[in-house]
Image: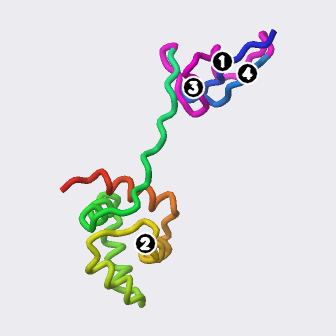
């Protein structure tokens, strides 16, 4: 009769959950443990306990001007953004950077700045998540 196991990497991340032959063992250095109720892929396993994966925080729709600038400064990107905006032929982007009280994640200004700086959507999302946690 097959048994249900979790295959765990050496740092404790659950890679796979499946039914296997009772005698099956994976190639080293993976660990095989019988699953518990909290076992899930991308969760963790340590000390005989499974911990479910923690979902990333949601990406906020907007952040304040201060939060945006602080997150960029913390990431070492503020000077590059200032330079890119000053050199931009896009008048609306320059006005938004100078006068906006908040920045919308899905705005054309954010998209154009991301493109100029070579930042991926994931990197922009992370900046917005970081910014949302900053309190003045």
| Whether residue 53 is situated above or below residue 114 in the rendered picture | above
Q: Earlier in the sequence, mark 3 or mark 2?
A: 3
Dot 4 alpha-carbon crowd within 10 angstroms: few under 14, some 14 to 19, many 20 or more: few
Q: Name the residue under label 1.
A: 32
Q: Mark 2 points at which residue?
A: 110
Q: Determine the secondary structure under disc 4.
A: loop
Of residues 22 and 109, which is closer to you in this image? 109
Residues rendered magenta in the picture: 21-48
Residue 133 in percent (x, y) is at: 30, 51
Q: N-terminal of the two: label 4 or label 3? A: 3
Between discs 4 and 2, the one toward the N terminus: 4
Q: Is mark 2 on a helix, strand or loop?
A: helix
- Between tags 4 and 2, which lies in front? 2
Asked whether the beta carbons under mark 4 and mark 2 sit within 8 Å of each other, the answer is no
Q: What element carries label 3?
A: loop
Label whose residue precedes the other's in the sequence (1 or 4): 4
| Residue beneath disc 4 | 26
Residue 71 in magenta stretch? no
Q: Name the residue under label 3.
A: 10
Real-space CA distance between mark 4 and mark 2, rounded to the nearest whole angstrom: 46 Å
Q: Tell me: residue 135, above or below residue 36.
A: below
- Residue 80 is marked as none
Instruction: Kindly indicate whether the residue at mark 3 contacts the one at mark 4 (C-beta within 8 angstroms).
Output: no
> In the rendered structure, are the residues bearing label 3 and label 1 in contact, judged by CB atoms less than 8 Å apart?
no
Question: Contact, CB < 8 Å: mark 1 with mark 4?
Answer: yes
Residue at 56% x, 29% y: name it: 13
Q: Is the magenta stretch mostly helix, strand or loop?
A: loop
56 horizontally vs 28: left or right? left
């Amino acid at each position: 009769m097959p048994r249900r196991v979790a295959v765990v990497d050496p740092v404790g991340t659950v890679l796979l959950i499946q039914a296997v032959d009772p005698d099956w063992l994976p190639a080293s250095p993976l660990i095989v443990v019988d699953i518990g109720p909290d076992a899930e892929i991308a969760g963790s396993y340590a000390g005989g306990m499974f911990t479910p994966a923690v979902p990333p925080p949601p990406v906020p729709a907007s952040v304040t001007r201060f939060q945006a600038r602080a997150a960029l400064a913390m990431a070492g990107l503020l000077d590059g953004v200032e330079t890119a905006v000053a050199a931009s032929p896009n008048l609306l982007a320059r006005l938004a950077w100078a006068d906006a009280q908040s920045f919308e994640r899905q705005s054309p200004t954010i998209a154009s700045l991301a493109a100029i700086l070579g930042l991926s959507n994931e990197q922009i999302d992370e900046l917005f998540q970081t910014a949302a946690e900053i309190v003045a």
